[in-house]
Image (cartoon, rainbow, N blue to C red):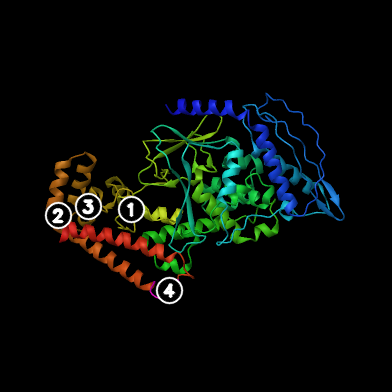
Amino acid sequence: MLERTYLLWNSRRRRTSHHFHWFFGLQYSSYCIKIIKNRGFRLRTKMRRGEHDINDKQTKFQYFYLRYNRIERTKMIYLVFAAVSIAYNGQVSAFHIRQLLHHTSTSTSTSTSTSTSTSTSLFSVVDIEENAPRDIQTMDEWASMCGVQKAEGVQYMSEDVDGTGGYRLDMSLMTTEDIPAESPVLFVPKEMVISSNKAVEEFGRLEDAEKLIISLNAGQELRQYYLMLKILAEWEGGEDSPWYPWLNSLPRYFQNAASMTPFCYKCLPSLMATLAMEERANLNHLQVKRVPFFSDNIKGYSDLWVWAYQIVYTRSFEANDGSGDLRIVPVADYINHGTETETAMGYDEEGNCYVQTTKDVPAGSPLRMSYGDPTNPSFLLARYGFLDESSPATFCKIILPHVNNELRDLGYAHDRMLFYKDTGEVSNEVWDVLLYQVLSSSNIARKRDLMKAHMDDDYETKQILHQQYYPETSAKLLEHIDTFINQLDELSTKSIGRDVNDHPRLPLIMRHNEFVRNTFFTVRARYFE
C-alpha cells in the first residue's frame, strides 16, 4: 500500500510539473538576481546552452552556464541564469541550479591564484548566534521549488520551548486536515538528502582525521563526522550553497547536553550526568583541525563546529534501506519525536525520501516519529534537548559498579529496568536484579537456583524465591527510592538563586528531575504506603 500511494502521488507530480517548470525557473532566477543586486553586484548576462544527454540520469538537466568577470583588483563572480529545461522526470529543480552555482563559484575561487577566500567573502553566511532568527518561510518556498511535496494541510507550527518567547522556538510539522492511514505526507527528492556516504565520496577518506577519531575510541561516530564536514562546507559557501535556505531555517539554540554549562552538569542525577558527559566528550572528539580543505578561520571557529555537531546529532537518522547510510532529509527533519507516532519515513529505489501516515491522523494533530526508546527520557534529553513527559516509564536509576553476564541475562538494561510513571509498577527485571544482589551477599547456592530457574524459564521456582526473600528485596528497593529522592532534592537546592540568563537550560533540567522524582514517589506509594 505504501508503495502504491507513493507511485500515485509521483505520477501526479510528473503530469503537473511540466506546466510550471518554466515559471519556477524564471521565478528562481529573479530571486537569485535580486539577492546579488542587493549586495551591490553588477550583473552581466552572457549565456551559452549546455550539452547534456537528457537520458543520462547523472546530468538530467540542461543549464545556462554562469560566467564571471573581474572588477578592478577584486575578483567577483557575476551570476545569472534564465531557466532550467525540462528534467528527465518532468520535475523542476531549483536545487540543481543552486548546485551548479555552488560548483561554479568554487572552481572560480580556486582558479584565481591571488585570492585565498572562498565564496563566504561574496555571500553572507548563516548567522549561528543563539538569538538569530530562523527563516522558515524562505526555506518552505525553496523546498517547493526543489520538488518537495507536502500533503494538503501539512504545515509548520511553532512552540515556545521554555516560556521566554523570542528566538527559542521549536518548529515542527502538523496537519490542519484529516489524513487517513497509509497516506503520503511528504516527498523529498534524493538530490536534497544530505548523506554520510555521499559526503565520503565528495571529500574522500580523510585518513589523518579518522586515525585521530579512532584513537579517541570514537570510531563509531565517523558517519556523523563526515556529515558535520558537509554541513560546515555548505555553511562556508554562504548563499552560494544549494542548502542555504534550509541551513538558515535551522535552530541555533539547543538545550541538550552538548549545549549545557558546567554548572548544569552539577544539577543532573547520576545517569543523566553520565549521558551528558558522554555527549560532551563525543563533541570534543569530533574536531575539524585535521581537515585539509578548511581554512584556519573555520578550524578555529569552535562555535561553528559545535553548531554543526548539533545539527547532525539532532536531525540525522540511519536509512532503513539496509545501506547503513546516515542521512539528514530537509523538511522531513521537522518531524518531531513522539511516544505515540503518526508517521514513518522510507526511501524508494532511487533514494527519494517519502513519509506516510501509520494511522488515521485527525486535523490539528502533530506529525511525529520515534527518535528512540520512549522509556529512556534521560537519553532523549541528553541527545536531543527535550523532555518527553508522555514517556510511560523511566529507568529505575539502579547503577551497578559492575554488570556481569548473569545480570545481563536477568535483564539489567536501561530499557528493561523500569519504573512506570502512571501506575507505579516496577518491572520484573528490577525485582530479579534486586533478588540477585541479595542472594549474592547472603546465599550463593540460592543465587545459582535463581539463575538456573531463569535460564530454564522455570517461573514457579523464581516466584518461590521472590516470595521467600521479598522482605529483603523490598527493603532494598525502598532504600534505593528514598536515597535517590534525597539526591534529587539536593540537586534542586543547588539551582536556587542561579540566574537563568547564565544557565538557560537549568529550568529544563529541573523539569526532568521533577519528572523522575514524581515517578519515584508513585512507585513508593504503590508498594510502601
In the rendered image, which quarter contains the N terminus?
top left
Q: CA distance from mark 4 to mark 1?
A: 37 Å
Distance Cα–Cα, label 4 vs label 3: 34 Å
Tell which circle, 3 or 2, labels the residue nearer the N-terminal end. 3
Q: Residue furthest right?
A: 72
Residue for badge 1? 403
Can residue 226 be seen by looking at this rendering? no
Q: Circle 1: is it few (<14), some (14-19), or many (20+) Cα within 10 Å?
A: few
Q: Please tell me whether mark 1 sits on a helix, a strand or a loop.
A: loop
What is the number of the mark on residue 469?
2
The magenta stretch spans residue 468 = no
Q: Amino acid at mark 2?
A: Tyr
User: What type is the residue that disc 4 sits on?
Assistant: Arg
Q: Which residue is mark 4?
A: 498
Return the residue at label 3: 423
Among the two numbered marks 1 and 3 on one chain, the one whose residue lies closer to the N terminus: 1
Could you tell me what secondary structure mostly forms the magenta stretch? Answer: loop
The alpha-carbon separation of the residues under discs 1 and 3 comes to: 28 Å
Residue at 66%, 29% in the rendered image: 87
Q: CA distance from mark 2 to mark 4?
A: 46 Å
Mark 4 / mark 3, whichever is N-terminal: 3
Sequence-earlier tag: 4 or 1: 1
Relative to 510, 242 lies left or right: right
Location of residue 423 in the rendering, given as x and y in whole percent from the top left corner: 22, 52
> Quarter of the image holding residue 507?
bottom left
Residue at image point 84% right, 47% down: 69
